[in-house]
Amino acid sequence: EPEVTQTPSHQVTQMGQEVILRCVPISNHLYFYWYRQILGQKVEFLVSFYNNEISEKSEIFDDQFSVERPDGSNFTLKIRSTKLEDSAMYFCASSPGTTSSEQYFGPGTRLTVT
Amino acid sequence: KQEVTQIPAALSVPEGENLVLNCSFTDSAIYNLQWFRQDPGKGLTSLLLIQSSQREQTSGRLNASLDKSSGRSTLYIAASQPGDSATYLCAVRGRNQGGKLIFGQGTELSVKP
């Protein structure tokens, strides 16, 4: 069964460093998402991506964040200068269509900023 | 602004018991609602998707219902097993919130052998 994959599973970085989180969505899906979950808190939406551009972003997704689909399979989230409060589990999701479609989530990348 | 609430926050039951998890949402203008399972430190596994036009969906021992007008969904788990122990999340996709999912805080379920 096709699944969303994410690498790395765990990333430790120092404050101020850049990190890139990678995702491979399900191959025939058209819509891609990043969410995050700070320990003990709700899962929060960050950004959605369709047709090679951002379709929606949350207030969390400021200038320090960017997304890219560099080729036909990968979908990346970059944090330019990490802060302690960026420590969280980051989930990538994809869906084949929009409003009625199920979103499929990857296993997550745990980001720890020290 | 859509708000999603899950009650209770935690639930402990003996093995074999039937149980109900509750989810409520403030804006009834939704496309659909998804129930997820999350094991500690792990990703989100989709359990059931209910479209706004549907009243319920079933998968094995799981049954999810949706009452859009009252802003409520329930997840019924029959004959619970220790392997069902996990956190259960509901998430809505609102018509006024684009394509994103809005999550509740989850119900942590523990099924005791």
Image (tube, grey):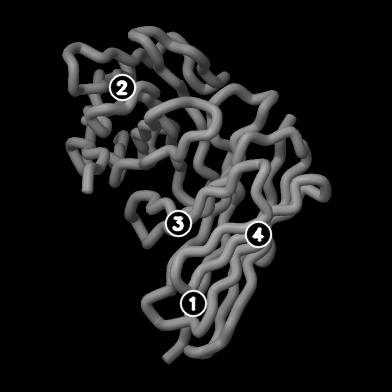
Give the residue at mark 2: A77
How much space separates mark 3 and mark 1, taking CA atoms?
A: 18 Å
Q: Are marks 4 and 1 on the same chain?
A: yes
- What label does residue B47 carry, if any? 3
Circle 3 SS class: strand
Dots 1 and 2: beta carbons under 8 Å? no
Q: Residue at x 66, y 62 (%)?
A: B74
Location of residue A68 (image quadrant): top left
Give the residue at mark 1: B110
Q: Residue at x 63, y 34 (%)?
A: B31
Q: Nearer the viewer, mark 3 or mark 1?
A: 3
Question: As drawn, which residue projects farthest toward the right?
Answer: B70
Q: Nearer the viewer, mark 4 or mark 1?
A: 4
Q: Nearer the viewer, mark 3 or mark 2?
A: 3
- What label does residue B65 carry, if any? 4
Q: Is residue B67 above or below residue B22?
A: above
Q: Chain of mark 4?
A: B
